[in-house]
């Protein structure tokens, strides 16, 4: 699992989403999530950019 703080997998191999956002400045997790999306064999991971409160101001 490339981003274990974001994704998990149950005993049947089904991937579970643990959280749906990455904290601002957490570049390591953001990179891991991007890698996971790129290698997902089912192409089931879709990423979107959302502006944080700091970025909106």
Image (spheres, rainbow, N blue to C red):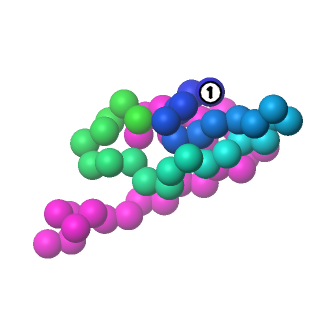
Does 55 sit above or below residue 26? below
If the image is split into quadrants, where does the N terminus sit?
top right
Work out which residue is located at the far front of the displayed protein and give it: 11
Q: Position of residue 24 (x, y in %)?
A: 27, 49
Pick the residue in front: 12 or 43.
Answer: 12
Q: Secondary structure at mark 1?
A: loop
If the image is split into quadrants, where does the C terminus sit?
bottom left
* Residue under the point 81% across and 32% down: 11
Q: Quadrant of residue 25?
A: top left
Q: Position of residue 14 (x, y in %)?
A: 78, 41
Q: Look at the image and say whether residue 25 sits in the magenta stretch.
A: no
Q: Look at the image and say whether residue 39 sits in the magenta stretch.
A: yes
Q: Is residue 41 visible?
A: no
Q: Position of residue 36 (x, y in %)?
A: 59, 35
Q: Which residue is mark 1?
A: 1
Q: Is residue 6 visible?
A: yes
Q: Position of residue 19 (x, y in %)?
A: 50, 50
Q: Quadrant of residue 54?
A: bottom left
Please indicate whether residue 56 sits to the left or right of residue 48 in the image. Answer: left
- The region drawn magenta spans 30-57
Please indicate whether residue 27 sits to the left or right of residue 14 in the image. Answer: left
Please indicate whether residue 47 sits to the left or right of residue 42 in the image. Answer: left
Report crowding for label 1: few under 14, some 14 to 19, many 20 or more residues within 10 A (C-alpha). Answer: few
């Amino acid at each position: 699992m490339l981003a274990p703080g974001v994704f998990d997998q149950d005993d049947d191999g089904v991937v579970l989403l643990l959280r749906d956002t990455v904290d601002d400045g957490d570049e390591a997790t953001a990179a891991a999530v991007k890698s996971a999306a790129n290698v997902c064999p089912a192409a089931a991971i879709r990423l979107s950019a959302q502006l944080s409160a700091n970025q909106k101001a």
